[in-house]
Image: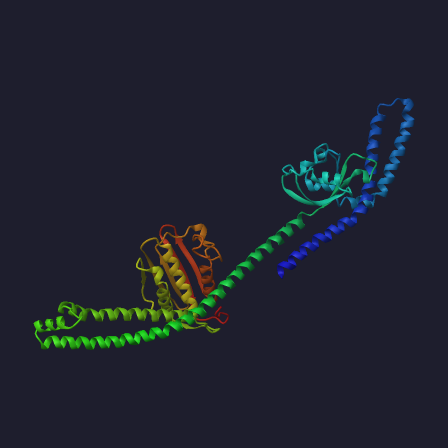
Amino acid sequence: MESILGKADIGFGMEAQGLFLVSSTVILLIIIFFLYKTYRTSINVEAKLSEFASLTDNRFGRKLHLIEVNADEYKLNKTLLGPLARIIDEYCVLTTDNRGTITFANGKFLSLSGHAFSQLIGQHESIHHPDSQDSGLPMMQCKHAASGVWNGEVCNQREDGSLYWMNMFLFPLSYISDEDDGFIYFGTDITDIKTENNQLIQEVKEKDQKLSHVETMLLHSEKMASLGTISAGIAHEINNPIAMLSSNLNRSREYLDTMSKVITGLQKRISAEKFEQFLQSEAGLKIEAKKLRFILEDHPALIDETSEGIERIKQIIRDLKNFSHNQPEHFSPTNIATCIATSLNLAKHELKNRIHVSHANLESLPLIPGSESQLSQVFMNLFVNAAQAIEGKGTITIAADCDDAWCTLTVTDDGPGIPGEHLEQIFEPFYTTKPIGKGTGLGLSICHDIIRHHGGIMTVESTPGTGTTFIIKLPLKQSDNVHAA
């Protein structure tokens, strides 16, 4: 809404200015007519004075009388035009011949353009816009227009090279005088208005971009919420068969242990030769005693590995539930070590066997007011980013230190590091150094926002070639105005 109103205000301001200029046109035409006639009269007076210098005494009286008449007329017109001249001086006025050669410019125009009168007279009007290929376009449009009048915004160049904008009217000189050759320009300086409008337009564009960013982040947030709901549902559905597998595996362990004891006891009661004959005589069995011993020795390890795999699945299910769990409005005491362990488990597919994770003294950290799922999301994002940044084998080091007010955690990788020109923008939405399709540029922005909502601070330090360290400072006590985002 703000952007719409801003654009409406801009349009209305420019429209009002245009209407004002149009309404002033009639008055200005009358004013310019008298001013131009006065100007021409003064030129005639100067010409007659030049002629007077060469006159003989016999013609002196007649010419002197003509000069006095013209001078009186000039004074009379100047007196009558006094108030009108002050009005016209508020507008920039310029006249040219049909070829665009400047024949007149008033003081207002000279002041705005920075040119002296002597610099302009006789010059082509393109002197004001030397780099433009369309400098004569308004004049051509005026020639071919049915009304013979052109109006528009013109960007001119001052004598010092700087630019200024004018709202300009252009029409033939024949409209206000007997002259058939030439055009007259008049207009107002709109540089400040143009600058303000451009600033407003830029602000509107920036706000539109921010709104677009917010919209995308909201969509991402909705996707994450949907993913959380789906993850919780999947975890619940998987949990039931996994529980059944775990129970059956434990029962199978008991059965195999019992059978192993029976076979081992049988071996002890009969001779090895008879035991071998027994194994060979059983239809379809035909198993060697050596192989049977291997089976009896190996099956506990197989059961243990399977049980370990089931426990890992259970842990992933618990982590998914914690990750997708909707936290209450206010934070609760959170174990940072649990958040880190959960994140490492979820990021294991990225770490694989090539990334060594080093951490110590995490269990001794005090509880921190916060959201376990949100903080787990932060750490998981940092671990995944670090693993993706490291080429080949590497190390991620997690360290923590607490004082009376803050808990400071650092996540350091020995990857290639981040160039200095990227560090200032690393937390901006949609900013990413990853190839297209490898990242959205939202991960670190969301992490930064989560830490900020926890009342904390998240910064980054990096030296190209040596690695990157993300520093997270979280308060040990919750502020009254801090709650889960």
Task: Give the quarter of the image for residue 241.
Answer: bottom left
Q: Count the numbered circles shown.
A: 0
Q: Is residue 119 left or right of residue 452?
A: right
The residue closer to the viewer here, 43 or 357, is 357
Q: Position of residue 93 (x, y in %)?
A: 75, 41
Question: From what the image shows, is residue 170 above or below residue 455?
Answer: above
Q: Is residue 430 left or right of residue 112?
A: left
Q: Position of residue 379 (x, y in %)?
A: 39, 63
Q: Position of residue 84 (x, y in %)?
A: 82, 45
Question: From what the image shows, is residue 475 above or below residue 72?
Answer: below
Which coloring applies here?
rainbow
Q: In percent of the image, x 91 and y 30: which residue is there? A: 65
Q: In percent of the image, x 66 and y 49: which residue is there? A: 194
Q: Is residue 352 left or right of residue 217?
A: left
Question: From what the image shows, is residue 271 above or below residue 166?
Answer: below
Task: Give the quarter of the image for residue 301.
Answer: bottom left
Q: Quadrant of the N terminus?
A: bottom right
Q: Is residue 298 left or right of residue 432?
A: left
The residue closer to the viewer here, 36 or 117, is 36
Asked whether residue 368 appears in the rendered view, the answer is no
Q: In percent of the image, x 62 and y 58: which residue is there? A: 3
Q: Position of residue 7 (x, y in %)?
A: 65, 56
Task: Give the quarter of the image for residue 249.
Answer: bottom left
| Residue sitting farthest toward the front | 283
Asked whether residue 445 appears in the rendered view, the answer is yes
Q: In percent of the image, x 50 and y 62: which residue is there? A: 217
